Image: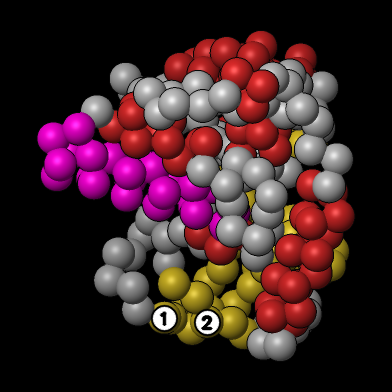
Amino acid sequence: MVDHYSDFWENNLLPDLLAKTTILRCKAQFAWHGIPERVISVDVGLRVRRSAHLQGSGGFEHIMSSLKHPKANGKAESAVKIVKSLCRTAAGAGEDPWKAILHWRKTPMEGMCCSPIQWLMSWRLRTLLPVADQLLAPKVMAEVPDKLWVKHQTAKMVYDRSAGDLSELNIGRQIRMKLLSEDWTGRWQRGICLQQAGPQHRGDHILSQSPSFTKMKLI
């Protein structure tokens, strides 16, 4: 789970992929960090529908990104890559992976003036490295919003160079798609859009309310 504001992430060990297990882990994080305004997760069909009561009782908006389209939830995918890289590096060096995670959380972010933990909670983490006591005192990072705005505008400018609005997918329109659970060859196949559903996604944001499709017929 990653915070979109500060890029601070939490990782939990899941003994299984049952909906109730995921819900319990979410509730534990919400009890620590507070209830979010919006949660973005991958649309995994039945498991998401079974956990709908979490959204209803939690008081937040639930946005589901497209399955097998990692760019639709790029923030989480980026956090997963960082966690895996830290764990692999720690395992290769015979070190404790939690120590690697600790040092990542205390390291200042590129282009920012503070670390993820300072960004989110306004205090530094104590490690085995010597540090003055006054540096461990809580301090609100007032300059973070301005730096964050500049960072987002720079990323948007780079992204807009090659990005564009997606065209609408109307019923009866011929399309090409990679089948999800039916075919694992990765080949594109021709089909016809049969049903309109939710909005199309590009990156982490909804660009328009153009309908996407959930059913298609091969031709």
Q: Please state which amino acid type lies under the numbered disc 1.
A: Trp
Q: Nearer the viewer, residue 193 or 18?
A: 18
Q: Please state which amino acid type lies under the numbered disc 2.
A: Arg
What range of the chain is rendered magenta? Answer: 73-95
Which quadrant of the figure has residue 36?
top right
Q: Name the residue under label 1.
A: 188
Coordinates of residue 152 in the picture (x, y in percent)? 76, 63
Coordinates of residue 160 in the picture (x, y in percent)? 74, 81
Q: Mark 2 vs mark 1: which is more N-terminal?
A: 2
Residue pictured at 40% horizontal, 28% vertical: 129
Residue at the extreme bottom: 161
Q: Which of 135 and 71 is in front in this view?
A: 135
Q: In this view, does 13 lie above or below 192?
A: above
Coordinates of residue 122 in the picture (x, y in percent)? 72, 28
| Helix, strand or loop for the magenta stretch, by majority | helix
Total labels drawn: 2
* Image side of residue 157 versus residue 87, left or right: right
Q: Does the magenta stretch include residue 64?
A: no
Can residue 168 be spotted in the picture?
yes
Residue pictured at 30% horizontal, 64% vertical: 184
- Asked if the residue under mark 1 is in contact with the one under mark 2, i.e. CB atoms within 8 Å, the reply is yes
Q: Nearer the viewer, residue 150 or 126?
A: 126
Secondary structure of the residue carrying tag 1 is strand
Q: How far apart are marks 2 and 1 (CA)?
A: 6 Å
* Image side of residue 193 versus residue 186, left or right: right
Q: Residue 176 carries which label?
A: 2
* Image side of residue 46 versus residue 128, left or right: right
Secondary structure of the residue carrying tag 2 is strand
Residue pictured at 80% horizontal, 65% vertical: 150
Q: In this view, does 98 lie above or below 114?
A: above
Which quadrant of the figure has residue 90?
top left
